Amino acid sequence: MLVKRMSSSSAFVNQDKVNAARQACKSLVEQSDRNAYILNAFLPPTGRDAHLALRAFNIQTAQVADQVSNASLGRRRLQYWKDAIEGLYTDRGSPEPSMILLAALSSRGIRFTKQMLARIPAARVCIYVTRLMFRANISGTSHSLVWQH
């Protein structure tokens, strides 16, 4: 079985961008997932950037459901993240801090499979669609019950 790995080219990654991306990921994780932020300090130094990048990516995709109320817009935003993952494997790059940090890790030989990264936004699509269906069901039920009285 062939597994496509992240590109090792660092054409769009320089040290200033990596440092800024690391700080942005750290801030996002600190604000949104305090436990993961604290845990990061106890990880071996070689694993900290990978942990921050993956946690930040997870937070960013999770926020899509909170930021939009339209299913079509939500799917487009999650497609953006799928495209960003694809960019890691084709040297297109992405301006997102989590993607810059993942690309930097790749140039240091720390790579994640495309399938593993793609599972995160794919799972978010399922959660997002389910949440919208739940909201529509609650809204429809509530309105029906209110109008019956």
Image: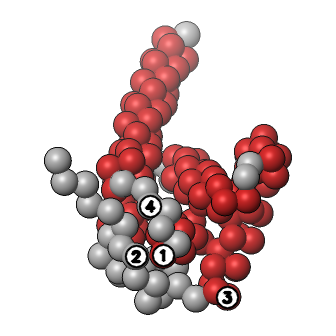
Q: Nearer the viewer, residue 77 or 122?
A: 122
Judge left or right: residue 71 versus residue 44.
left
Of the image marks 2 and 3, the number of the one nearer the N terminus: 2
Does residue 15 lie above or below 31 as drawn?
A: below
Of the image marks 1 and 3, the number of the one nearer the N terminus: 3
Does residue 103 lie above or below 35 as drawn?
A: below
Q: Which residue is mark 2?
A: 8
Amino acid type of disc 4? Arg
Q: CA distance from mark 2 to mark 1?
A: 5 Å
Q: Which residue is mark 3?
A: 16
Where residue 85 sits, quadrant-wise, is bottom left
Does residue 84 lie above or below 119 as drawn?
A: below
Q: Residues within 10 Å of mark 4 (few under 14, many from 20)?
A: some
Where residue 36 sits, quadrant-wise, is top right
Q: Is residue 96 visible to the viewer in this orientation of the structure?
A: no
Of the image marks 4 and 3, the number of the one nearer the N terminus: 3
Q: Are marks 1 and 4 in contact (CB under 8 Å)?
A: no
Which mark, residue 135?
Answer: none
Amino acid type of disc 2? Ser
Q: Which residue is mark 4?
A: 111
Residue 54 percent coordinates (x, y): 57, 54
Q: Which residue is mark 1?
A: 107
Q: CA distance from mark 4 to mark 3?
A: 21 Å
